[in-house]
Image: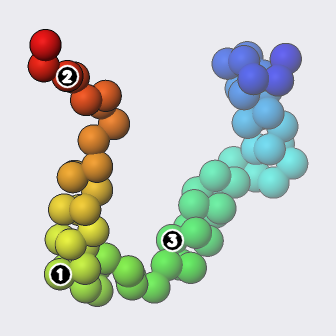
Amino acid sequence: MAGTQAGGKAAASTDKNKYGPDFYAKIGAMGGRKGRTGGFYANRELARVAGARGGRVSRRTKKTEE
């Protein structure tokens, strides 16, 4: 049943039975603690430049005028 809603619920139930009812809260907290608030948060200008570059890249095909 991998990849189905029922399979996901069964996996969640197994995890909670094995590791406790707060399993997902614990692993989420671990990830939150690992963050060091760097990257774009620390450099707003870098974020602005990167966003502008990404915005200029079009994924649409160019339509030729006929």
Q: Which quarter of the image is occupied by the N terminus?
A: top right
Query: Which secondary structure, mark 2?
Result: loop
Q: Nearer the viewer, mark 1 or mark 2?
A: 2
Label 1 vs 3, first from the N-terminus: 3
Q: Is residue 58 above or below residue 56?
A: above
Residue 19 location, quadrant? bottom right
- Residue where numbered disc 3 is placed: 32
Tell me if mark 1 has few (under 14), some (14-19) or many (20+) residues whose alpha carbon lies within 10 angstroms of its own. few
Amino acid type for the residue under numbered disc 1:
Glu
Q: Is residue 9 above or below residue 48?
A: above
Measured as percent of width and height from the top left, residue 20 is found at 76, 52
Label 1 vs 2, first from the N-terminus: 1
Query: Which secondary structure, mark 3?
Result: helix
**Side of 37 relative to 17 (left or right):** left
Instruction: Farthest residue to the left: give it.
Output: 65
Amino acid type for the residue under numbered disc 3:
Gly
Q: Which label sits on residue 45? A: 1
Q: Nearer the viewer, mark 1 or mark 3?
A: 1
Between 16 and 64, the residue placed more toward the observer is: 64
